[in-house]
Image (cartoon, rainbow, N blue to C red):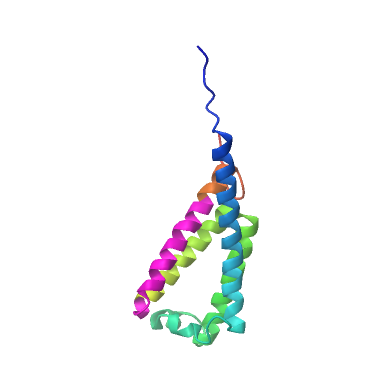
Amino acid sequence: MSVRSEARPAVTRDGDRIAFMLLRTVFTVAPILFGLDKFVRVLTSDWERYLAPWMDDIIPGDATTAMAIVGVVEIAAGVLVAFLPRLGGLVVAAWLAGIIVSLVSVGGYLDIALRDFGLLVGALALSFLAAGRGYGWLRRRG
Protein backbone atom coordinates (compact mmCIF):
# COMPACT_ATOMS: atom_id res chain seq x y z
CA MET A 1 0.00 0.00 0.00
CA SER A 2 1.49 3.29 -1.04
CA VAL A 3 1.11 6.58 0.76
CA ARG A 4 -0.26 9.33 -1.47
CA SER A 5 1.53 12.61 -1.55
CA GLU A 6 -0.35 15.66 -0.29
CA ALA A 7 0.97 17.65 -3.25
CA ARG A 8 -1.69 19.24 -5.41
CA PRO A 9 -2.08 18.10 -9.01
CA ALA A 10 -0.22 20.10 -11.64
CA VAL A 11 -3.50 21.21 -13.24
CA THR A 12 -4.58 22.89 -9.99
CA ARG A 13 -1.21 24.57 -9.55
CA ASP A 14 -1.37 25.84 -13.14
CA GLY A 15 -4.92 27.09 -12.58
CA ASP A 16 -3.84 28.91 -9.44
CA ARG A 17 -0.93 30.49 -11.31
CA ILE A 18 -3.13 31.60 -14.20
CA ALA A 19 -5.81 32.99 -11.86
CA PHE A 20 -3.15 34.83 -9.88
CA MET A 21 -1.58 36.36 -12.99
CA LEU A 22 -4.98 37.43 -14.39
CA LEU A 23 -6.02 39.08 -11.14
CA ARG A 24 -2.62 40.68 -10.59
CA THR A 25 -2.68 42.13 -14.10
CA VAL A 26 -6.23 43.50 -13.81
CA PHE A 27 -5.70 44.95 -10.34
CA THR A 28 -2.45 46.58 -11.45
CA VAL A 29 -3.72 48.06 -14.72
CA ALA A 30 -7.30 49.06 -13.79
CA PRO A 31 -6.49 51.23 -10.74
CA ILE A 32 -3.66 52.94 -12.62
CA LEU A 33 -5.93 53.69 -15.60
CA PHE A 34 -8.80 54.87 -13.39
CA GLY A 35 -6.35 57.01 -11.42
CA LEU A 36 -4.89 58.57 -14.55
CA ASP A 37 -8.38 59.26 -15.85
CA LYS A 38 -9.05 61.50 -12.85
CA PHE A 39 -6.64 63.89 -14.63
CA VAL A 40 -7.30 63.31 -18.36
CA ARG A 41 -11.05 62.56 -18.10
CA VAL A 42 -11.52 60.25 -21.06
CA LEU A 43 -13.84 57.75 -19.33
CA THR A 44 -16.05 60.46 -17.82
CA SER A 45 -15.84 64.23 -17.62
CA ASP A 46 -17.50 64.31 -14.19
CA TRP A 47 -15.87 62.00 -11.65
CA GLU A 48 -17.08 64.35 -8.91
CA ARG A 49 -20.68 63.11 -9.24
CA TYR A 50 -19.61 59.82 -7.63
CA LEU A 51 -18.19 61.54 -4.54
CA ALA A 52 -20.54 61.65 -1.54
CA PRO A 53 -20.95 65.22 -0.23
CA TRP A 54 -19.93 64.18 3.30
CA MET A 55 -16.70 62.69 1.90
CA ASP A 56 -16.05 65.88 -0.05
CA ASP A 57 -16.41 67.79 3.23
CA ILE A 58 -13.63 65.80 4.93
CA ILE A 59 -11.20 65.78 1.98
CA PRO A 60 -9.15 69.00 1.65
CA GLY A 61 -10.09 71.38 -1.18
CA ASP A 62 -13.00 71.14 -3.57
CA ALA A 63 -14.40 68.03 -5.28
CA THR A 64 -11.98 68.34 -8.21
CA THR A 65 -9.04 68.38 -5.79
CA ALA A 66 -10.56 65.40 -3.98
CA MET A 67 -10.72 63.48 -7.26
CA ALA A 68 -7.08 64.33 -7.97
CA ILE A 69 -6.17 62.89 -4.55
CA VAL A 70 -8.28 59.83 -5.34
CA GLY A 71 -6.44 59.47 -8.66
CA VAL A 72 -3.03 59.52 -6.98
CA VAL A 73 -4.15 56.92 -4.42
CA GLU A 74 -5.52 54.69 -7.19
CA ILE A 75 -2.26 54.89 -9.15
CA ALA A 76 -0.29 54.06 -6.00
CA ALA A 77 -2.60 51.10 -5.25
CA GLY A 78 -2.05 49.70 -8.76
CA VAL A 79 1.71 49.98 -8.39
CA LEU A 80 1.50 48.32 -4.96
CA VAL A 81 -0.41 45.38 -6.48
CA ALA A 82 2.31 45.00 -9.11
CA PHE A 83 5.09 44.67 -6.53
CA LEU A 84 3.35 43.39 -3.38
CA PRO A 85 0.16 41.69 -4.55
CA ARG A 86 -0.86 40.28 -1.17
CA LEU A 87 -0.78 43.69 0.50
CA GLY A 88 -1.91 45.47 -2.67
CA GLY A 89 -4.97 43.26 -2.97
CA LEU A 90 -5.99 44.17 0.57
CA VAL A 91 -5.43 47.88 -0.08
CA VAL A 92 -7.48 47.76 -3.29
CA ALA A 93 -10.26 45.86 -1.48
CA ALA A 94 -10.36 48.50 1.27
CA TRP A 95 -10.32 51.27 -1.33
CA LEU A 96 -13.21 49.65 -3.19
CA ALA A 97 -15.14 49.43 0.09
CA GLY A 98 -14.73 53.20 0.43
CA ILE A 99 -15.94 53.71 -3.13
CA ILE A 100 -18.97 51.51 -2.42
CA VAL A 101 -19.83 53.57 0.67
CA SER A 102 -19.57 56.76 -1.40
CA LEU A 103 -21.74 55.39 -4.21
CA VAL A 104 -24.43 54.18 -1.82
CA SER A 105 -24.33 57.52 0.02
CA VAL A 106 -24.76 59.51 -3.20
CA GLY A 107 -27.66 57.30 -4.30
CA GLY A 108 -28.56 56.33 -7.83
CA TYR A 109 -25.39 54.29 -8.36
CA LEU A 110 -26.28 50.99 -6.71
CA ASP A 111 -25.50 49.12 -9.94
CA ILE A 112 -21.95 50.47 -9.92
CA ALA A 113 -21.66 49.76 -6.18
CA LEU A 114 -22.64 46.13 -6.80
CA ARG A 115 -20.08 45.84 -9.60
CA ASP A 116 -17.44 47.32 -7.31
CA PHE A 117 -18.37 44.75 -4.66
CA GLY A 118 -17.54 42.04 -7.20
CA LEU A 119 -14.20 43.75 -7.82
CA LEU A 120 -13.62 43.90 -4.05
CA VAL A 121 -14.09 40.12 -3.84
CA GLY A 122 -11.65 39.70 -6.75
CA ALA A 123 -9.07 41.88 -4.97
CA LEU A 124 -9.41 39.71 -1.87
CA ALA A 125 -8.99 36.59 -4.01
CA LEU A 126 -5.79 38.07 -5.43
CA SER A 127 -4.47 38.68 -1.93
CA PHE A 128 -5.30 35.12 -0.84
CA LEU A 129 -3.71 33.62 -3.96
CA ALA A 130 -0.61 35.76 -3.45
CA ALA A 131 -0.36 34.56 0.15
CA GLY A 132 -0.61 30.95 -0.97
CA ARG A 133 2.08 31.42 -3.61
CA GLY A 134 4.42 33.15 -1.19
CA TYR A 135 4.41 36.48 -3.01
CA GLY A 136 4.63 39.80 -1.31
CA TRP A 137 3.95 40.87 2.25
CA LEU A 138 3.70 38.22 4.98
CA ARG A 139 4.63 35.20 2.94
CA ARG A 140 2.91 31.93 3.69
CA ARG A 141 4.48 30.06 6.56
CA GLY A 142 4.74 26.34 7.04
The residue drawn where x is 55% and y is 80% is 43
Say left or right for 51 vs 130.
left
Question: Residue 42: percent from the left, percent from the top?
Answer: 58, 83
**Which residue is drawn at the image coordinates 54% and 24% (left, top)?**
5
Residue 36 percent location from the top left of the image: 61, 76
Q: Is residue 44 above or below residue 22?
A: below
Viewer-proximal residue among 16 and 134: 16
Query: Where is residue 87, by image quadrant?
Result: bottom right
Q: Which residues are magenta?
A: 105-127
Is residue 139 shown to the viewer in this render? no
Question: Residue shown at 48%/80% (left/top)?
Answer: 59
Image location of residue 38, percent across then percent down:
57, 80
Vertical side of 5 occupied by 48: above or below: below
Is residue 117 on the magenta stretch? yes
Quarter of the image for the C terminus: give it. Answer: top right
- Residue 4 drawn in magenta: no
Of residues 45 and 56, the one nearer the viewer is 45
Above or below for 1 versus 95: above
Q: Quadrant of residue 32?
A: bottom right
Q: Residue at coordinates 53% horizontally, 53% vertically from top-left?
A: 126
- Tell me the chief SS of the magenta region: helix
Residue with the most extreme top position: 1
Q: Nearer the viewer, residue 86 or 2?
A: 2
